[in-house]
Image: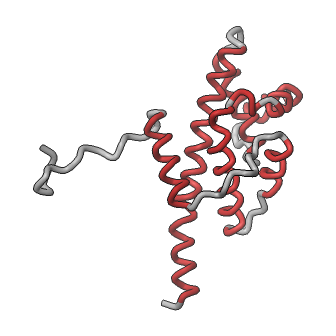
Amino acid sequence: MSGAEQEKAFDNRLLPVMMEAVDTVRMVLFKAYRDNLRLRHPDRPGDWHRRLAGAVLGNLFGLVPEDQEQTAFIAANRELAERELRGLGAHIAPLLPLLTDALRMKAICDNQRGVHSLPSLLMARELGLLLEERDLPLPSVFMTSVRKLAVEQGLVEGFGTPLSSDGGAPA
């Protein structure tokens, strides 16, 4: 296999894994932001919080809703969703480093797939959500930090029970 073929094979294996890590960050952000909305708007029905969080984060990540009800919700609440997007940084401040990394990794992966997602990065920068001074982590460092966060958030299980000292089954 030539060097170019090896690189392409590597990219084909790495891109889905990287996009899964980006999706995991989006899930963590969604959960944190939805919970924040519930605290700030306890009078709203639960579905409202989920839909608004989806509208705001979907806009930030450049996603088009597939659900007709979500599309209708976005249309009916466009101004509110835009206001919330402008204030998002204050509500998820501890997660801004991972948001920065996820948006950058998404742009890199999208570029490799021929998708233009630079507008998401530019919007995040304009909204003060992109920590520009933050170094772009290596893919392995990004995936490890996302995995750790997912375990902490209860989205995935930890790495399992350690093997016994003789390398056999768990003790």
Residue 63 visible within the image: no
> In the figure, residue 152 lies in which quadrant?
top left
Horizontal side of residue 127 vs 26, given as left or right: right
Q: In this view, does 110 lie above or below 25?
A: below
Query: Which residue of the protein is positioned furthest toward the top in this rendering?
Result: 43
Residue in the image at 76% along x and 48% along y: 62
Horizontal side of residue 80 vs 106, given as left or right: right
State the image coordinates of residue 66 (x, y, percent, origin top left): 70, 43
Q: In this view, does 159 lie above or below 107?
A: above
Location of the C terminus (image quadrant): top left
State the image coordinates of residue 18 (x, y, percent, origin top left): 56, 58
State the image coordinates of residue 23 (x, y, percent, origin top left): 59, 47
Residue in the image at 65% along x and 62% along y: 109
Residue 93 visible within the image: yes
Residue in the image at 10% along x and 56% along y: 166
Residue in the image at 75% along x and 46% along y: 130
> In the figure, residue 25 lies in which quadrant?
top right
Report the number of numbered marks: 0
Q: Which colour scheme is used?
A: secondary structure
> In the figure, residue 4 lies in which quadrant?
bottom right
Q: Is residue 126 above or below residue 39?
A: below
State the image coordinates of residue 65 (x, y, percent, origin top left): 73, 42
Query: Which residue of the protein is positioned furthest toward the right in this rendering?
Result: 79
Nearer to me, 6 or 55: 6
Horizontal side of residue 117 vs 137, given as left or right: right
